């Protein structure tokens, strides 16, 4: 299994530009999470999807941030316009869906991608 | 709400020293507990987990026991190696079964030869 795939791995852009980060979850996983990691704020959950539907976007910092999941195998996180304070490492993670027997199966580990290091100049 | 508190780092140890990283949690119900590790330049990966009280999770020489009475899940290793240098995150599962994890702030471990 290829694991969670993120692209690009590194992105350097100038303030005001649009940035799009991409994530391919593990095949068969039906929940996807976007995180941001900085030295100052640690690991923050931005948004998560279940069956391609956004469930909780309360962590999205501003309207400049948007996320989509058009199908089960692809998600994007877009920042428009970008600002220097958006510089961070952005992670995507996925988990498999629950079994029909119990929601206990939801309590599985999240599988993280390698992250995208974003630098906004 | 539910929360996780880890001991502050960085923790600096010599090779072969004993490691403890403290983690306590606040939660209603019976969450699962996790330790994740993040090596430099990489994403987080699961190190170990425990799904109910008194369970012990173990992996790669690391251990942690789910202690409901003290609401703790301390990470231990008897003899650390330089290759264990990383950031360690304690986490608990969201109690409503969404798959969300609530992470601690992370503890940086540096092991010197």
Image (tube, coloured by chain):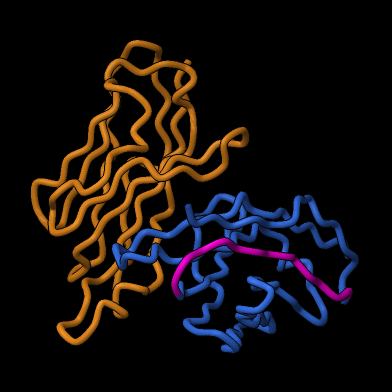
Chain colours: A orange, B blue
Q: In terms of depth relative to the viewer, which is nearer, A71 or B51?
A: B51
Q: In terms of depth relative to the viewer, which is nearer, A97 or A38?
A: A97
Q: Quadrant of residue A73?
A: bottom left
Residue A12: x and y, percent? Answer: 42, 25
Report the side of B45 relative to A57 (left or right). right
Q: Residue at x 44, y 31 (%)?
A: A118
- Residue B67 inside the magenta-drawn segment: no
Q: Residue at x 23, y 31 (%)?
A: A66
Q: Residue at x 39, y 62 (%)?
A: B94
**How many numbered marks appear?**
0
Report the side of B102 relative to A26 (left or right). right
Residue A79: x and y, percent? Answer: 30, 25
- Residue B27 inside the magenta-drawn segment: yes
Residue B55: x and y, percent? Answer: 57, 88
The C terminus of chain B lies in quadrant = bottom right
Q: Residue furthest left?
A: A71
- The residue range painted magenta reads B17-29
Q: Which residue lies furthest to the top in this view?
A: A16
Asked if A115 appears above or below B80 in the picture, the reply is above
Q: Residue at x 70, y 72 (%)?
A: B74
Q: Quadrant of residue B112?
A: bottom right
Residue A32: x and y, percent? Answer: 26, 55
């Amino acid at each position: 299994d290829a694991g969670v795939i993120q692209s690009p791995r590194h992105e350097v852009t100038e303030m005001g530009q649009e940035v799009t980060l991409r994530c391919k979850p593990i095949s068969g996983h039906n929940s996807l999470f976007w995180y941001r990691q900085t030295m100052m704020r640690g690991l923050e959950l931005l948004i998560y999807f279940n069956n391609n539907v956004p469930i909780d976007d309360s962590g999205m910092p501003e309207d400049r941030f948007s996320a989509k999941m058009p199908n089960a195998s692809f998600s994007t996180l877009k920042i428009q316009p970008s600002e220097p304070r958006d510089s961070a490492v952005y992670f995507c993670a996925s988990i498999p869906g629950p079994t029909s027997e119990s929601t206990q199966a939801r309590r599985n580990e999240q599988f993280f991608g390698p992250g995208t290091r974003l630098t906004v100049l | 709400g539910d929360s996780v508190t880890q001991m502050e780092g960085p923790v600096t140890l010599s090779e072969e020293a004993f490691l403890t990283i403290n983690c306590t949690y606040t939660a209603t119900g019976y969450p699962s507990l996790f330790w994740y590790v993040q090596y430099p330049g990489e994403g987080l990966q699961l190190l170990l987990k425990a799904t109910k009280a008194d369970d012990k999770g173990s992996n790669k020489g690391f251990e942690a026991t789910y202690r409901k009475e003290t609401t703790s899940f301390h990470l231990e290793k008897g003899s650390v190696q330089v290759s264990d240098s990383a950031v360690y995150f304690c986490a608990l599962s969201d109690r409503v079964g969404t798959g969300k994890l609530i992470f601690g702030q992370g503890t940086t471990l540096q092991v010197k030869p």
